């Protein structure tokens, strides 16, 4: 059994209290057994101190106190030196050395605290007091029996030991109060400086918010002004385009109306001549209809291509304007994005500073809370035990209350600061979301611009293909006009050669006559040398088919007469071509000499 401290005052002299360290200090529910009282569970304060002998610093001592906050004279003490622990180790069967022994005891005490929620508790601390001796046990209860883990012999303290213990506790409380007062003064100074910084931060935040609102209003006003200017420009441009279109439409209507009047007059003349050439019309109707249909198809295709070309040009102009507008919007979005990035970086730096300050305040607040809790516990025990030091304890309580009030105020200010920082974080998140949406809008605008560029390129390719087709049609029309002029020359030469004495059906252009004499009705025209050496155009030699021509005297062929005659061909009774010009008969090669189609003898078929 180890030695214990009871009423021997030399133990306080041998134990160096100034260098002792507290390993464990908590309230523990202990089952107290006394001879003259019933068993009851009391809340006892267990404190474990580790120190050295004042006379021999190489000798370590472990001291354990059991005290009660309700009974100031309740004190049980155990003191074990390093040499005495060896006998206790052999007696109790302990497997740890002196250095690890306090940690294992603390572990068992923690299990006792945690087991209080169980019914019955698995681990229980038991103090048995019998006269001048007391035994402290930590018992584990299972289904079979109660197993004691450790049994320590304590001695209850007498008046001298209790007074020395209370004096020791009083000195600790005074020292703790002095440290706490110094910490309180330091905390109050920090609080004042933090409050000033917080006020400066609030003012800066208000200025930043006001500047942001002012900038936002300016941006909105600028955007509205730009939209109004763009709308006015588009309205003016649309009015100009409309007036230009109306003028062009009036001009075209006047032009086509004049052409229609001329064609109507020409149609009346052709109807008169149609009666004279009715005998020839029935033989050549089918061939002329086919050629006229082809010519009308070519003219319709040409007009449709011209309309398509004008439509594509207008669409290209509109796409160019839309592209320029998109580029302007993209530049504006880039400028706004750069300004928003700068503002976000500044806000992030400011918020990081505020976060660091809040963390420092929270750490200091936690330290104050821990020190305040320790101070409350020590002050409560001191108030019960030391009635002689009532005045000092009351003063300490007032100081503690003041510290608690200041601590509550500091917590309230910290909570307010956290709320302000939370709002700043929300504003920052909103700005980040706005920045993301602006980035997505910019990407969408870039995709639209690329798409419009691709469409513009496709339209340009289509316009170039249509231009090539239009050039081909123009070339074909020029070839047809050349052929018609050549035929007119041939008719004029024939008129000059015959001098107007023969019948209109009995002559043949010199360039088209062969070497033999062709008889025509009652008149025979000898084959002689021709006064004209004009050869047919190359288009006639390159044609994939042969054409028969019948020349009518005193008539000329023009492109307008040919086109009007082809458009007036609506039935078999109407003559499809102009009267008095060379009628074309399409036929395959090898049928130039046949006259089985019912052509009058005076009409001479010629093969080119």
Image (spheres, grey):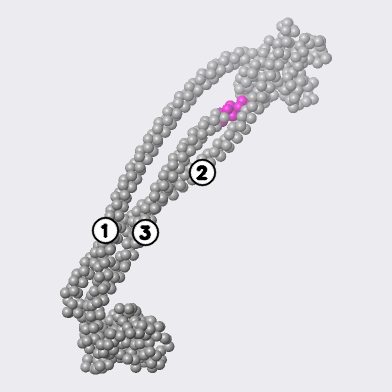
Which residue is pictured at 34% across the width and 41% down the height? 217
For residue 295, side relative to residue 348 (left or right): right
Q: Residues within 10 Å of mark 3 (few under 14, many from 20)?
A: few
The mark found on residue 192 in the picture is 1
Q: Magenta segment range?
A: 298-308
First of labels 2, 3 by sequence position: 3
Which residue is pictured at 61% across the width and 19% down the height? 564
Whole-angstrom CA distance, mark 1 to mark 3, is 18 Å
Q: Is residue 61 above or below residue 606?
A: below
- Residue 397's quadrant in the figure? bottom left
For residue 438, side relative to residue 452 (left or right): left
In the depicted view, which residue is nearer to us: 62 or 29? 62
Quadrant (top left/top right/bottom left/bottom right) for the N terminus: bottom left
Q: Residues within 10 Å of mark 1 (few under 14, many from 20)?
A: few
Quadrant (top left/top right/bottom left/bottom right) for the C terminus: top right
Q: Residue furthest front?
A: 55
For residue 315, side relative to residue 234 (left or right): right
First of labels 1, 3 by sequence position: 1
Residue 128 seen = no
Whole-angstrom CA distance, mark 2 to mark 3, is 43 Å
Q: Is residue 127 magenta?
A: no
Q: Identify residue for label 3.
A: 356
């Amino acid at each position: 059994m180890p030695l214990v401290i009871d009423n021997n005052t030399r133990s306080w002299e041998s134990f160096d209290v100034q260098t002792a360290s507290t390993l464990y200090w908590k309230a523990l529910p202990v089952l107290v057994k006394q001879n003259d009282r019933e068993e009851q569970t009391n809340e006892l304060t267990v404190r474990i101190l580790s120190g050295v002998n004042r006379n021999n610093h190489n000798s370590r001592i472990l001291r354990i106190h059991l005290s009660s906050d309700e009974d100031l004279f309740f004190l049980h003490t155990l003191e074990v030196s390093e040499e005495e622990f060896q006998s206790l180790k052999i007696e109790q069967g302990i497997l740890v050395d002196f250095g690890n022994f306090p940690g294992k005891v603390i572990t068992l005490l923690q299990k006792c605290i945690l087991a209080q929620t169980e019914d019955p508790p698995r681990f229980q601390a038991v103090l048995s007091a019998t006269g001048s001796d007391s035994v402290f046990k930590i018992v584990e209860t299972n289904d079979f029996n109660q197993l004691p883990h450790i049994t320590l012999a304590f001695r209850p303290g007498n008046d001298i030991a209790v007074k020395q213990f209370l004096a020791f506790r009083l000195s600790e409380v005074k020292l703790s109060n002095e440290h706490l007062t110094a910490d309180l003064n330091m905390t109050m100074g920090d609080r004042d400086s933090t409050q000033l910084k917080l006020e400066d931060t609030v003012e800066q935040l208000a200025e930043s918010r006001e500047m942001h609102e002012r900038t936002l209003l300016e941006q909105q006003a600028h955007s509205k002004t730009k939209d109004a200017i763009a709308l006015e420009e588009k309205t003016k441009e649309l009015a100009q385009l409309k007036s230009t279109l109306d003028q062009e439409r009036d001009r075209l209507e006047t032009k086509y109306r004049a052409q229609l009047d001329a064609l109507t007059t020409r149609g009346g003349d052709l109807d008169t001549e149609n009666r004279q050439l009715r005998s020839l019309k029935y033989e050549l109707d089918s061939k002329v209809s086919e050629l006229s249909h082809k010519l009308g198809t070519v003219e319709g295709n040409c007009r449709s291509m011209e309309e398509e070309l004008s439509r594509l040009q207008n669409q290209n102009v509109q796409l160019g304007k839309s592209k320029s507008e998109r580029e302007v919007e993209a530049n504006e979005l880039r400028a706004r994005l750069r300004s928003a990035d700068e503002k976000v970086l500044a806000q992030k730096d400011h918020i990081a500073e505020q976060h660091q300050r809040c963390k420092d305040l929270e750490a200091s607040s936690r330290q104050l809370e821990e020190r305040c809790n320790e101070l409350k516990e020590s002050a409560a025990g001191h108030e019960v035990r030391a009635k002689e030091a009532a005045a000092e304890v009351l003063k300490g309580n007032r100081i503690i209350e003041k510290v608690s009030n200041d601590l509550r105020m500091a917590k309230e200010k910290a909570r307010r600061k956290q709320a302000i920082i939370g709002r700043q974080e929300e504003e920052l998140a909103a700005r980040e979301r706005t920045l993301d949406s602006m980035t997505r809008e910019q990407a969408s605008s870039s995709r639209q611009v690329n798409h419009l560029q691709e469409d513009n390129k496709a339209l340009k390719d289509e316009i170039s293909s249509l231009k090539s087709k239009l050039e081909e049609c123009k070339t074909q029309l020029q070839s047809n006009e050349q052929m018609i002029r050549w035929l007119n020359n041939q008719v004029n030469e024939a008129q000059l050669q015959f001098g107007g004495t023969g019948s209109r059906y009995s002559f043949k252009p010199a360039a088209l006559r062969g070497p033999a004499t062709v008889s025509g009705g009652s008149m025979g025209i000898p084959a002689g040398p021709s006064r004209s050496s004009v050869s047919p155009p190359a288009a006639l030699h390159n044609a994939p088919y042969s054409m028969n021509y019948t020349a009518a005297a005193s008539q000329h062929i023009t492109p307008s007469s040919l086109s009007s005659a082809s458009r007036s061909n609506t039935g078999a009774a109407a003559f499809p071509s102009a009267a008095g010009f060379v009628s074309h008969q399409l036929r395959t090669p090898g049928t130039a000499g046949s006259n089985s189609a019912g052509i009058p003898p005076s009409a001479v078929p010629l093969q080119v």
